[in-house]
Image (tube, coloured by chain):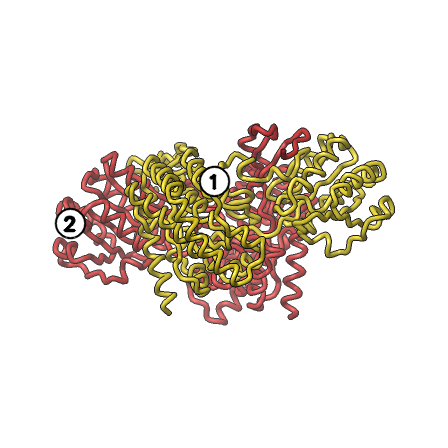
Chain colours: A yellow, B red
């Protein structure tokens, strides 16, 4: 009950602050961002001291090495936070943009104005840098934020929040524009995602378990990113050297990322020619290959793929390979097994490329490029709050525009309905 | 359990049909729409016969006159259904539209392609014409539909569905592109709104109870329309004759519609001058007025408004009136009590108008025009599936574009991430 009342208070304060932010001028928001960046740089030592507290508790609790690494604030990471905020300040302000004003036969002039969503709740795990990144994106897009980080990062997050509050205050903005939840009680999350009167959208950032829990229990819209089971399809008309480079890059550039390829689809008529050399390259890179029966006939030394492989996001040096009859079969496989994140076709055939682009129902569909390009920075969004695998509202990399909405505006001169 | 299996089957069939619809050419979809329109005209007698069955059952059940009226299919309403489909056929096809293709420094060319959402579930009450209207909009936007109408309209809806299926077949499209749920078991709705694997979005059309129940229980995104508590604010700088016309039109053009004014806000400095004449006009039209204390001092004959009045969508010849200190107070009242549907300011002051446009957080914000313009036809969307009071995805009148999503597309020439 105490947690509920506390979260309600944060919600009310956020709603009030959101009204102020919505009408704040671009230069005020930018001043706040740049001031926060400077304060973060100046406070590097105290940020590291707070972080040290979290690390000590984390080691005591027996957090694993990967988790401790994500939790650690180094000088480089602190500088990256500050630079991230400066980059956000340099982005164009999406708010207030008016588009498509046209006269209607009634005489009214109608168009759309881009406005903030209002209050955004961010739920994340152990990376403290998310506090600054997410707050920065929300601030620039005129939204108030309620941030709920992992309990293991509580001291780091509060130290970063102190820098943010100082910056907001110096810029003349309400400190309640960015609020970090101060309790580690899990009930706080339950409250945050069920206050539609105060929170307009929730962005969960973290593992699949967190995201699924939030999505199931939320009574507020959720912008979510589940799996990244991405495919590269090498068509019969592919330029095979290009196909090899793209497939290799899509798998091996980084393993633990959502836009890495997890399944390679190969047209039956080129499989015998293409797969042996391709496999050699993967094996030299120590990628474990798992094949369908046809693949196994060509590459007898590799493991057999099970049905579960087609639905698995490895996030590791593992690749499943399937030979398909044609591009229709590739598209059918993708529709059945893909997480609708990113898929690529490699082909020189115009019609095949056009059909793949049109029919594949994923947030990013590419021709002759690595799936690794599906990313807010590569797409020029400047920064991303996440990659959405939803179809409604924001799809794919979510930048500033994904944190806004468009309302209709009407300029009249006394028009009434007849 | 039987209902669950039945709904799962409908869902699977819809998902498969959605793949076909997504790649269907514009002329095929238009042929289907025009053919269905013709068949509906030809089958007018059998539609009325089926409707007669529903009406008999409805009278037996003791449905009230308004409900029976909504349920009735007259020749005029049948013709309107056919014409509605022809109008949808005449609209531009939103699907496949590619926007903003630009080269990124990496060499990839990036843009967005408009695509269908996939499968849309429509839940509605007794109006059988929704069956044709909703199916037409979904079909044109390349979406498969599962329609669940009110049980009192089951025969009418199935007769309309038969016309739709005949038309789909003649156009060479799968009949499962539009499916009408054949059971009146309420469990069917519960299933429909909890099958995210088969249904991409739910559009409930009907009373508030229906919409709230669907929103609370759905595990699929919902495009919803709750209240329409719309405001007209007459500013100190209003042209008062214009203000009177707009306020009168916003209230009296039609009472039972969501874009009608429910509360009139008046600047304190003009209230004494403006309200008496305005009130006279409303009273002559038999509109019941309910005022705040300041209004009551000016119009002592009217009823006092209670706190509940500011939060009530009358949908009737009742109007609440409040005198406010200035435009900031008007905006504050709107933010507290509006349903974020449509608000109008009447003013000749540039700065006041700009601030109202920017700060009022509603789906339509107007200057010097009647709230009654907030409508898909008036906005030139051609037709609307509803008016959304949500902020995410579609906001305000939802036409064809609201039934689509945009995916990212990338044209590469062998690019890999470095």
Residue at 49% over, 39% down = A383
Chain of the residue displaying label 1: A
Residue A241 in view in this figure: yes
Judging from the image, what secondary structure is the residue with disc 1 in?
helix
Q: Quadrant of residue B37?
A: top right
Q: Quadrant of residue B300?
A: bottom left
Quarter of the rendering occupied by the C terminus of chain B: top right
> Rounded to the nearest whole Å, what is the CA distance between mark 1 and mark 2?
64 Å
**In the depicted view, which residue is nearer to us: A168 or B115?**
A168
Look at the picture and state if A181 lies above or below A246: below
Q: Are marks 1 and 2 in contact (CB under 8 Å)?
A: no
Look at the picture and state if A321 lies above or below B416: below
**In the depicted view, which residue is nearer to us: A4 or A365?**
A4
Q: Quadrant of residue A356?
A: top right
Quarter of the rendering occupied by the N terminus of chain B: bottom right
- Counting every numbered tag in the picture gives 2
Mark 1 — residue? A80
Judging from the image, what secondary structure is the residue with disc 2 in?
helix
Residue at 57% over, 50% down = B135
Image location of residue B103, percent across then percent down: 57, 28
Mark 2 — residue? B276
Q: Residues within 10 Å of mark 2 (few under 14, many from 20)?
A: few
Image location of residue A314, percent across then percent down: 68, 51
Q: In the rendered view, does B200 fall on the left or right side of A334? A: left
Image location of residue B371, percent across then percent down: 33, 45
């Amino acid at each position: 009950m105490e947690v509920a009342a506390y979260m309600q208070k944060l919600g009310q304060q956020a709603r009030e602050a959101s009204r102020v932010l919505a009408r704040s001028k671009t230069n005020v928001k930018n001043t706040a961002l740049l001031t926060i960046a400077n304060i973060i740089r100046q406070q590097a030592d105290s940020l590291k001291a707070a972080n040290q507290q979290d690390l000590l508790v984390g080691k005591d609790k027996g957090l694993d090495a990967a988790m401790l690494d994500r939790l650690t604030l180094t000088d480089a990471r602190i500088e990256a936070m500050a630079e991230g905020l400066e980059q956000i300040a340099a982005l164009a302000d999406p708010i207030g943009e008016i588009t498509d004003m046209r006269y209607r036969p009634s005489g009214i002039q109608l168009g759309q104005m881009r406005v903030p969503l209002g209050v955004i709740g961010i739920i994340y795990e152990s990376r403290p840098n998310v506090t600054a990144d997410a707050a920065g994106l929300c601030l620039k897009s005129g939204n108030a934020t309620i941030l709920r980080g992992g309990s293991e990062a509580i001291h780091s997050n509060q130290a970063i929040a102190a820098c943010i509050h100082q910056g907001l205050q110096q810029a003349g903005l309400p400190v309640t524009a960015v609020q970090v939840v101060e309790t580690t009680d899990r009930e706080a999350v339950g409250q945050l995602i069920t206050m539609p009167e105060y929170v307009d959208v929730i962005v969960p950032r973290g593992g699949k378990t967190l995201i699924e829990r939030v999505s199931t229990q939320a009574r507020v819209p959720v912008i979510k990113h589940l799996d990244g089971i991405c495919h590269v399809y090498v068509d019969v008309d592919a330029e095979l050297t290009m196909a090899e480079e793209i497939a290799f890059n899509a798998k091996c550039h980084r393993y633990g990322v959502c836009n890495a390829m997890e399944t390679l689809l190969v047209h039956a008529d080129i499989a015998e020619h293409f797969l042996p050399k391709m496999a050699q390259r993967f094996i030299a890179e120590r990628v474990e290959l798992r094949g369908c029966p046809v693949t196994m006939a060509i590459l007898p030394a590799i493991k057999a793929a099970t049905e579960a492989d087609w639905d698995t996001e490895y996030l590791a040096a593992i690749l499943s390979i399937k030979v398909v009859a044609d591009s229709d079969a590739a598209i059918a496989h993708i529709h059945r097994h893909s997480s609708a994140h990113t898929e690529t076709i490699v082909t020189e055939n115009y019609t095949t490329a056009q059909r793949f682009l049109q029919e594949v129902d994923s947030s990013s569909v590419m021709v002759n490029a690595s799936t690794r390009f599906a990313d807010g920075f590569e797409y020029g969004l400047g920064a991303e709050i996440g990659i959405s695998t939803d179809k409604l509202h924001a799809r794919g990399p979510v930048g500033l525009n994904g944190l806004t909405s468009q309302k209709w505006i009407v300029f009249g001169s006394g028009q009434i309905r007849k």
